[in-house]
Amino acid sequence: MKQRLSFPKHPARDTARADWIDERRREARAVVADVAHHSDHLIRLACTVLVQRGETDKEREDARILLVVVDAKHPTRGNHRQDPEVGS
């Protein structure tokens, strides 16, 4: 017979974490709602938050689509090495 392990419950910490996540989600929604006035970096960050923590499937999917659109604006983003076939 296995003995069940009991982990301590921390309701105050859990509540604070949930509040913190809700606040980040609200901030991300505000950024996405006004993409014209925010940098691509901030939009990417907001989309990442919504992809991971969005409340509905629709919200997460819309954030994924916007992330693809923003990344498509800079196709070489993250590619810091020069192409050996070009130049030299």
Image (cartoon, helix red, strand yellow):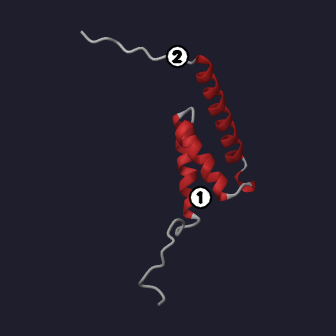
How far across and how far down the image is residue 24, in percent?
66, 38
- The answer to whether 32 appears left or right of 60 in the picture is right
**Which disc number belongs to residue 9?**
2
- The answer to whether 19 appears left or right of 7 in the picture is right
Q: Are marks 2 and 1 in contact (CB under 8 Å)?
A: no
| Residue at image point 56% right, 53% down | 67
Q: Check disc 1 and report its element: helix, strand or loop.
A: helix
**Which disc number belongs to residue 37?**
none
Q: Earlier in the sequence, mark 2 or mark 1?
A: 2
Q: Check disc 2 and report its element: helix, strand or loop.
A: loop
Front residue of 85/65: it is 85
In the image, residue 31 above or below residue 55? below
Q: Amino acid at mark 2?
A: Lys
Q: Which residue is mark 1?
A: 70
| Residue at image point 56% right, 18% down | 10
Q: Farthest residue toward the right?
A: 37
| Residue at image point 52% right, 69% down | 76
